[in-house]
Amino acid sequence: MSNSLNRLVSRTKPPPQSFQTTAEQILREARERQEAETHHPKQKITDPTKLVHYQLRKRKEFEELIRRARWNKSVWEDFKRARSVWERAIDVDYRDHRMWYKYVCMEMKNKFVNHARNVWDRAVTLLPRVDQLWYKYVHMEEMLGNVAGARQIFERWMSWEPDQQAWNSYIEFELKYKEIERARAIYERLVQCIPKVEMKIEELSKGYERAVDREGIEDAIVGKRRFQYEEQVRTNPRNYDSWFDYIRLEESVGNKPRIQEVYERAIANVPPADEKRYWQRYIYLWISYALYEELDAQDVSRTRDVYRECLKLIPHKKFSFAKIWLLAAQFEIRQLNLSGARSILGNAIGIAPKDKIFNKYIEIELQLGNIDRCRKLYEKYLEWSPENCYAWSKYVELERSLGETERARALFELAIAQTALVRVMLPKKPEKRRQIEDYLFPEESQASNLKILEQAYKWKKQKVVLDDDVD
C-alpha cells in the first residue's frame, strides 16, 4: 500500500524547475511593468483667469482625496497652509490683537502648544501695551500647569511698567499659589513704580493753574468783545445784527441773567416806522428770545409772555407776521395746550388773516380729525379770499376724500359762479385784457366791429345827401 501511495504522490507532484524565482526578480518585473508617473510641468501664473482655473483644479484634487480617504484626518487638515494664511493676515495688520488671539486659538485647538507659545511671544513683543494679550498668555500657561512659565511672563510684563491693575493681577497670582514672600516683593516694586502722592498733588496743582490761566485768558477775550459790542449798540441801537452778535457772545458764556438782560435791551429798540421792511430783522430778536427761553432756559411761563408781548407790539392793522403767530401756536401745542393754540390761531384769523395761517390751522385740525372745524375754517378762508383757487380746490379735495360727492359738486358750482376768480386771472394791462376777451368771446368782438361799420356807412350816406342839396 505504501508503494502505491508513493506512486500516486509522484504522479501529482510537479517536476522541479530548472531555475528558482527570487524576490528581487519579482520586484524588478513589477518595477519594469509599472507605468511612468506623469508630472505636471511647472507653471507661472500671470493671468487671473489661469489662477482661477488652477485653484479650481486644486480644489477638485483635494475633494477627490477626501472622498477616497475620508477616515484619515491628516487629509482634512492642512496646518501649514492655515499657518501661512494667518501669517499673511498678520503681515497686513499686526496691530490687530484679535488676529493674534484667533491664531493662538487655532494652535491650541489642535494641541500645538509650542506653536501657540511662539505666537504669544511674538504678539506680546510687538504689542506690549495690550493687556489682553498678556492675560491670555498667562491663562494658557496656567491651564497647562506651567506656573514657572506664567511667572516669567508676568516678569516680562512688569518690565514694561503697566498700570496698577496688572500689578494687582501679578500679586493675586502669587497669593493663589501661597507665595507670600513673592507677593510682598511685588508690592514693594509696585510702590516704587507708581508715582508718589506728592508728585500727583503737584501735577494736579499745575493742571489747575493752567486751567485757571486759560479761563482768565478766555474772560479777557470775552470782556474785550463785550466792550466792542457795547460800543456798537450804543452808537447805533437799531443795528440788529450787532445785537445778534452780542447775544451769541453771552450765550456762549452761559450767564442766564446777563443773556436775558441783553435780550430785553435788544427788543426795547422798536423800529421807528410802521413799515414791514424795518420790522423784518427786528422780529427775529423776539423769535430768538422765545426759543432761548423755551429750549435753553426751559421757562414755559416766560416763553408764553415773550410771545404775548411780541404779538401785542406788532401793528397788525398795517402789517403782520404769520411766522410769529404760528410759532406761538406750535409752542402751545408742544405744551399740550390745544385750546391755547386754537385761541392764538383764531385771533390771527380775526386780526391779520393770511394764507399760511389758514393752511396751518386747517392742517392741525385735520390731523386731529375735526372735520367740522376744517369746514368752518375753509368757509372763513373763502369768505376772506373768494378769488383763491387753491383754497377752493383744497376744500373740494377734502370733501372728495370724505366721500361727500354732493358737497364737492356744490362747491364746484359755487366756485364757477365766482366772477372774482375771472377778474383775478385776467391781466392788469388793458391791451392784454382786451386781447384775451376778444379771444374768449369772439362773437362780441365781431358784433362791435359790425356796429362801427354800420355807423360809418350811415355817416358817409348822410354826407353824400348833404352835398347834393348844396349843389
Image: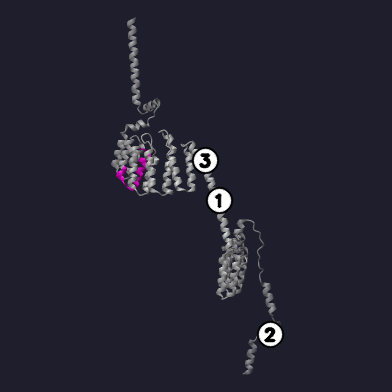
Q: Is residue 398 above or below residue 451?
A: below
Residue 360 within the magenta-colored segment of the rendering: yes
Task: Give amino acid for label 3.
Answer: Gln
Kind of residue at badge 1: Arg
In front: mark 2 or mark 1? Answer: 1
Can residue 102 be seen in the rendering of this structure? no
Residue 228's label in the rendered image is 3
The crowd level at tag 2 (other Cα within 10 Å; few <14, some 14-19, many 20+) is few
Where is mark 2, residue-wise?
16
Q: Position of residue 58 (x, y in %)?
A: 60, 63
Mark 2, mark 3: which one is toward the viewer?
3
Q: Is residue 195 left or right of residue 379?
A: right
Secondary structure that dominates the magenta span: helix
Left or right: where 411 falls relative to 191: left
What's the magenta region?
A: 353-374
- In the rendered view, tell whether residue 143 sits above or below residue 200: below
Question: Quick one: label 1, few (<14), some, or many (20+) residues within 10 Å?
Answer: few
Quadrant hosting residue 24: bottom right
Q: Give x and y (percent) for residue 430.
A: 39, 25
Q: Residue furthest top?
A: 471
In the image, residue 219 above or below residue 192? above
- The label shown at residue 214 is 1
- Label 1 and label 3: CA atoms lie apart by 21 Å
Which tag, 2 or 3, sits closer to the chain's start? 2
Quadrant of the rendered structure where residue 111 is?
bottom right
Residue in front for this viewpoint, 203 or 418: 203
What's the residue at 56%, 51% (across, down)? Answer: 213
- For badge 2, the amino acid type reads Pro
Where 411 sits versus 120, above or below? above
Looking at the picture, the colour scheme in use is: one colour
Regarding residue 430, the answer to whether it shows in the image is yes
Q: Which numbered disc, 1 or 3, marks the residue that appears first in the sequence?
A: 1
